[in-house]
């Protein structure tokens, strides 16, 4: 019985190893296929927070996506999805004070993410 299981076990270990190594090779060669392009960077009135409006593009099979991230002033803007607002149309922002940000977006927009509080900042949304 043990002699029959040994080749199966070895085969499974080899397959798992090939999958793991293949995944590492693909990630090393191609990395993250998405890219961000900053459209606007707006600091809060006291300059402690920074709101980034950017477009995220993940290649030919997906369209670009306007997004918003609110970060602390010392945080580095990274190649990630927005942490506050994601949509399919352009939008604008306005700091109301150090802890409140207004997002103005078109009423026909598709909304993929709409967080009301991010990184200590309350976000107000207005559709027009």
Image: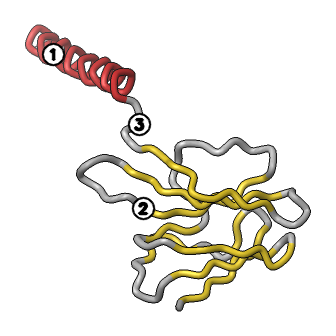
Q: For residue 103, what is the image quadrant?
A: bottom right
Of residues 4 and 88, the one nearer the viewer is 88
Mark 1 sits on what residue?
A: 11
Question: Crowding near pointer 3: few (<14 within 10 Å), some, many (20+)?
Answer: few
Lower sequence index among marks 1 and 2: 1
Mark 2 sits on what residue?
A: 65
Q: Nearer the viewer, mark 3 or mark 2?
A: 2
Query: Label 3, label 1: how many angstroms apart (C-alpha)?
Result: 31 Å
Lower sequence index among marks 3 and 2: 3
Question: Crowding near pointer 2: few (<14 within 10 Å), some, many (20+)?
Answer: many
Residue at 59 percent across and 42 percent down: it is 78
Lower sequence index among marks 3 and 1: 1
Residue at 78 percent across and 53 percent down: it is 72
Mark 3 sits on what residue?
A: 32
Q: For residue 12, what is the image quadrant?
A: top left
Residue 122 versus residue 34 in the image, above or below: below
Of residues 64 and 69, the one nearer the viewer is 64
Residue farthest to the right, as pictured: 46
Question: Crowding near pointer 1: few (<14 within 10 Å), some, many (20+)?
Answer: few
Query: Label 3, label 2: how many angstroms apart (C-alpha)?
Result: 16 Å
Q: Nearer the viewer, mark 1 or mark 2?
A: 2
Query: Label 1, label 2: how many angstroms apart (C-alpha)?
Result: 43 Å
Of residues 100 and 113, the one nearer the viewer is 100
Q: On the picture, is 44 further left or further right than 64?
A: right
Q: On the picture, is 72 further left or further right than 108?
A: right
**Are the residues tagged 3 and 1 within 8 Å (C-beta)?**
no
SS for dot 2: strand
Residue 85 versus residue 96 in the image, above or below: above
């Amino acid at each position: 019985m043990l002699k029959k299981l040994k080749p199966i076990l070895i085969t499974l270990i080899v397959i798992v190893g090939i999958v793991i190594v293949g995944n590492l090779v693909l990630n090393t060669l191609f990395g993250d296929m998405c890219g961000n392009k900053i459209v606007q960077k707006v600091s809060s009135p006291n300059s402690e927070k920074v709101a980034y409006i950017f477009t995220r593009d993940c290649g030919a099979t997906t369209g670009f996506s306007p997004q918003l991230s609110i970060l602390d002033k010392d945080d580095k803007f990274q190649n990630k999805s927005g942490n506050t607002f994601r949509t399919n149309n352009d939008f604008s922002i306005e700091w109301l004070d150090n802890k409140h940000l207004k997002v103005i977006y078109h009423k026909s927009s598709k909304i993929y993410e709409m967080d009301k509080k991010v990184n200590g900042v309350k976000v107000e949304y207005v559709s027009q």
